[in-house]
Image (tube, helix red, strand yellow):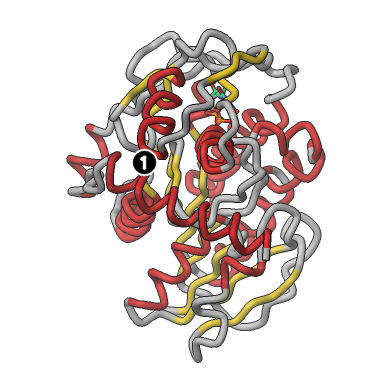
Amino acid sequence: MRILVAGGAGFIPSHLGERLLAVGHEVVAIDNFVTGDRRNLASFAQHPRFRFIEADISRELPVEGRFDRVYHMASPASPIDYVQLPFETLYAGSDGTRRLLERAEADGARFLVASTSEVYGDPQVHPQVESYWGNVNPIGPRSVYDEAKRYGEALTMAFHRYRRVPTRIARIFNTYGPRMRLNDGRVMPAFCSQALRGEPLTVFGDGSQTRSFCYVSDLVEGLFRLMESDLDEPCNVGNPHEMTMLQLAQYINRYTGNSAGIVHRPLPTDDPTQRRPDIGRARERLGWEPKVSFEDGVRETVAYFAARIRDDRA
Ligand code: UDP
């Protein structure tokens, strides 16, 4: 198949593109590098079935030829990005989603949008099941992301209902692994880079808030299965292995042998207090569940960040 991956130089989509090439597809990746990184493409940039286009999907889609599949993975995705790139975040989820849906319709392609656990906001239902509508602040600092993704889901369902476009909605929960940006502000790169530099880990608030982390190869497998399934309702993709941020900090310090301990910093506005996916739908409809243990995932991730820190120093 010929497959478009929007946001293709990002953390998760670069792994997705590589995976699609490995199973024999032709992949066109498009990215404007606002948060993506050319180095994420290095291991497959020269592949004969791969093509890269530098462009902003919220403004244009300068790609010829028909696609069979369109993955919309383009958006800033870290809380510190939303503050620095509020309009880019809103437009990627709104104009970008519209442009890619229109292209999927014109091409007769199947469309998958990367939505998010953030559509549940600070959830009052735990674990989060797809039927939960969420508790989102529509005007808070995270709203540029949360509401853009919610609008993206609404637009996707409208194209599905009224224009018969085959669509898929993946609600992606916290994901980690190689190719995350060292300085993207998210908790995994923050804790790993602090630990590797022998600095104290910055735990926001009292650290009792929870997250559930999925290793990137598992996540990509879930996205791929969802795209190839017949499931047109939203589907959570994530790992239910839940922990507090204090437990995560202690684990990373222990694993890396960092003796600098932790320091507490103020909790960001609207930081969700708990998050864990209910993956019953993915299990049943996609035959999917995460396989990589937290210990193995952390080992790979810390090794990657250690190499990046060495490269940066060189
Ligand atoms: N966090 C933290 N220290 C950091 C960065 C993040 O304690 O240096 C916390 C943050 O407050 C949140 C959790 O870790 O409760 C996950 O944050 P992240 O930005 O990775 O993603 P989120 O799930 O909030 O989108």
Camera sees residue 189: yes
Q: Residue at x 35, y 14 (%)?
A: 126
Q: Secondary structure at mark 1?
A: strand
On screen, 282 above or below 200?
below
Residue 210 position by quadrant: top left
User: Is the residue indicated by label 1 positioned so its CB lies within 8 Å of ligand 1?
Assistant: no
Q: Residue at x 74, y 22 (%)?
A: 141
Q: Is residue 47 left or right of residue 35?
A: left
Q: Which percent across, then down, holds residue 54?
A: 74, 71
Q: Which percent across, then down, holds residue 153?
A: 54, 38
Q: Residue at x 67, y 66 (%)?
A: 314
On screen, 294 above or below 4?
above
Q: Looking at the picture, which amino acid does disc 1 mark?
A: Cys
Residue 72 position by quadrant: bottom right
Q: Give the residue furthest to the bottom.
A: 48
Q: Quadrant of ligand 1?
A: top right
Q: Which percent across, then down, holds residue 142?
A: 68, 25
How many discs mark residues in the rendered view? 1
Q: Give the residue furthest to the front.
A: 259
Camera sees residue 165: no
Image quadrant where one finds the N terminus: bottom left
Front-most of 232 and 6? 6
Q: Which residue is tagged 1?
A: 214
Mark 1 surroundings: few (<14), some (14-19) or many (≥20) residues within 10 A: many
Q: Which percent across, then down, holds residue 182?
A: 61, 48
